[in-house]
Image (cartoon, rainbow, N blue to C red):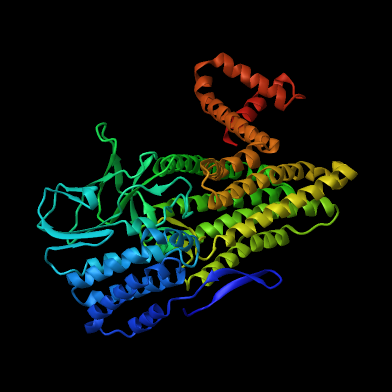
Amino acid sequence: MVGYQVAQCNLPNLWQPIYDYCVLRIFASLKDEAENLQVENLPQFMANVRNNAVLQIQNITDSPATILTIVEILKIISSFSQTILINKPLMTDFLKTTDVIGSDDTRDTWVLLNKNSTTMNASSELLNSTERIVRRLRDESISILTNISSLNKTSITAPFSGTFGENSSSKINIPVTSTQTSLTVIISSAFNNVLPVRNLTYNNSSQTGTSINGDVVLIETNSTINNISLAFDIKNKTLGSPQCVFWNFNLLNGIGGWDSTGCQLKKFANETERITCECNHTTSFSILMSPFTLDENLAIVLDYITYIGVAISLGSLVLCLIIEMIIWKSVTRNDTSYMRHVSIVNIAVSLLIANICFIIGAAVVKKGVGPCSTATFFMHFFYLALFFWMFLSALLLLYRTLMVFSRMTRGAMMAIAFTVGYGAPLIIAVITVASTAGSQGYIQKDYNCWLNWSQTKALLAFVIPALTIVAINLLVLIVVLCKMLRRGVNATTQPDEKHPLMVIARCVAILTPLFGLTWGFGIGTMVSPNFGIHVVFAFLNSLQGFFILLFGTLLDSKVREALVQRFSLSNLSSIRTRSTSAGPSSSSGFPFFQRLRKRNLYNVSSPKMSSSNSDTATDSYAARPLL
């Protein structure tokens, strides 16, 4: 063995091994040889790897480092194979080596490897190496059978139906192909031991009660197949809730996991021991079964909650901004009210743009890293701006409560507010991009346009500032409440600032815990598969715009009074306009009312004049409409 071990001293003179990085010497030498291998020596080298793997099988099964070394060797061989055609003997040696490192005795070792963050992609790399070398098989009929694996390559024309695997445990139906197609099928129980049960919803590689409950079938064709049907014999009949899945190498930021996209479960009443799946692509298929609810159904529920909530949120934010435009002059008569409404407007604008970026991100998630990274950057920036403007509201409350007679100019407050409200989020967002772009770990590639978590923990660049602001705001609220209780509200504020400060306090007291609780559940979704946590987070997060409209605008009595006054004046103005336009036409038709209006106007405009001055009064009346 070569390498080293990491041990921990628990008791005096007693060391407990923690990590074992020791590799069988022969495979360490073979890896060094593989890195300098010539293509013409590939068949002999592969045979040498297979012979040593079979001879050392007892020592390999309990050595994680040796298994990882063999995976690296097979990866190098698959890379070399891209320049040549692979014959049957070389492919046989490759499968026999895979049988050794995927035998039943290695199952526990693979569980440990799939749990470790530094080695959890090894299983995906082994499967990918197998798929790559299979694509380079010679264009001829090939049949290989090993202890736990089988390979069949043949030429087919549609419709095609065939059974594969030990005891014909898997059946493949291809109804339509455009031309004669080369079909390669590998069924290996080694991958049942190697591949974990992780997927997008449950990132944990060792889900309790979930298992691969059928063959892992690897299918390769030389032409596109739009529809394929696979039937699997069920291994454990006590499990329920089957899922038709394929291995997605891009899932979980390139780590790989099971994905159900494009596959549907078909249930037949007469098939109680077999599961049928229909998919619109070809790759590595299997079925996952567990005692829990189907992942795709959960995802659909969460999607409905999210998109309905976001639509309500967008409408609420637009309405909030319209209301602020209508009542702006009426409610911003002092500096405190002015800054309060500036904060509300910027909070609404930030969340509105962030939600729009969320919708754009959902649309471009499959368009590549560039568009998805752009949407993620602006979401990160504007979500942070939302929290920083909440922070500024709390600071304004603290400043006006503690510094009762101190006056800062409106211009100075605006400069500080916009510098902190948008400058700080911009700095954080730019640093996040700069620090993670090199490792390609900025976003959650291929399935979600948002900050990476599993690889670089870039999401902490949002979580830490947001939750820190929540904590500071709650602390500010406690200080302000203590100050008011000790001195009284009137003693701690100017008379004209009492109402806006109370509204700010209410907003901070309600919105800060609400937003903090929302993103607290967001952290919960990263560490727990509990469906309830995901539902609560989706519900609260998608309705933030409605909460801002309700608690920041509609519950403010001054805002409601300004709206009532504005619409009352509009109605009164409309009535006066109609009365003025109706005057000339009515006076010409009814002389009696015309004389009555003249008399009334004379009495009002010239109360001290006698009746003999009626001509003057008439002239005065006649001149009024011209003004």
Q: How many marks?
A: 0
Query: In the rendering, at what x and y percent does residue 57 appear?
Result: 37, 68
The answer to whether 28 is drawn above or below residue 155 in the figure is: below
For residue 176, side relative to residue 186 (left or right):
left
Front residue of this view, candidates 410 and 610 = 410
Residue 573: which quarter of the image? Answer: top right
Residue 445: which quarter of the image? Answer: bottom left
**Residue 349 in view of the camera:** no
Task: Please name the residue shown 12% across and 63% down the image.
Answer: 141
Task: Please name the residue shown 54% across and 53% down the image.
Answer: 526
Quarter the C terminus occupies: top right
Front residue of this view, candidates 208 and 174 = 208
For residue 178, side relative to residue 551 (left or right):
left
For residue 17, side relative to residue 95 (left or right):
right
Query: In the rendering, at what x and y percent does residue 148 appear?
Result: 28, 59
For residue 191, side relative to residue 18 (left or right):
left
The answer to whether 194 is drawn above or below residue 438 in the figure is: above
**Residue 436 in view of the camera:** yes
Front residue of this view, candidates 492 and 285 = 285
Query: In the rendering, at what x and y percent does residue 8 appear?
Result: 63, 70
Residue 49: which quarter of the image? Answer: bottom left
Query: In the rendering, at what x and y percent does residue 368 appear?
Result: 37, 62
Front residue of this view, candidates 62 and 457 = 62
Task: Please name the residue shown 78% across and 52% down the image.
Answer: 398
The answer to whether 273 is drawn above or below residue 370 in the figure is: above
Q: Residue furthest top?
A: 592
